[in-house]
Image (cartoon, grey):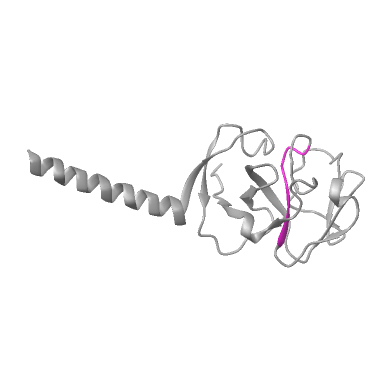
Amino acid sequence: MKKEIVKYGIILIIIGGLSWLVSRYWFQLMLIQGDSMEPAYHSFQMVVLDKHFNEITYGDVIAFRCESLDAVLVKRVIAVPGDTVEMKEGTVYVNQQPAEWVPDNGSVTYPGLASEPWVLARNQYFVLGDNYEVSKDSRYPEVGGVSEDMILGVVVPQKP
């Protein structure tokens, strides 16, 4: 009986250790909170975060740490390092072209920091919530450009 308890205890420790390693370095379950990413992601929806990503590109949904808001935010990448972003007359422009990765949820009424052309630094991303009206994103000074060291991972796309 005692040997079985020790055996099961060791198995639980191994499983717990492997789960911790996977969650720390590769994949992590994450709970979406708030409706800034509606309709793609809903409040209280579970998603998988890929922490072992190689490259972040247009349209990726990322999770990142925002120190000024003391929160982890989930937003869509609209522009990558070196791009120029500007919002005018309700449209998002990347490199003087209408952005392809902006969901068609109407016009953007608040351009914020992107009201003038903004050239992203070499390690900076411009992110936007799919639900523009309620999203705190790169348009706001509290968030601004997202640097690579703030990024926790890429949300694994859902199957339709």
Residue at screen point 27% across, 51% down:
14
Q: Residue, x 60% and y 63% (percent of image)?
A: 55
First to last magenta residue range: 124-132
Tally of numbered discs: 0
In this rendering, position of residue 130 left or right of residue 45: right
Q: Which is nearer the eye, 119 or 1?
A: 1
Left or right of 62, for residue 144: right
Considering the image in quadrants, where does the N terminus appear?
Answer: top left
Which residue is most to the left? 1
Say left or right for 96 vs 25. Answer: right
Looking at the figure, which quarter contains the C terminus? top right
The magenta stretch spans residue 125: yes
Residue 70: image location, x then y, percent: 64, 42
Q: Residue 44: image x %, image y %? A: 56, 32
Q: Is residue 20 magenta?
A: no
At horizontal 51% and vertical 53% (from top left) the residue drawn is: 50
Q: Position of residue 61 (x, y in %)?
A: 63, 49
Q: As rendered, which of 61 and 3 lies closer to the eye?
A: 3
Q: Residue at x 85, y 51 (%)?
A: 114
Q: Nearer the viewer, residue 83 or 123?
A: 123
Question: Residue 110: percent from the left, percent from the top?
Answer: 86, 41
For residue 150, side relative to residue 88 (left or right): left
The image quarter containing residue 90 is top right
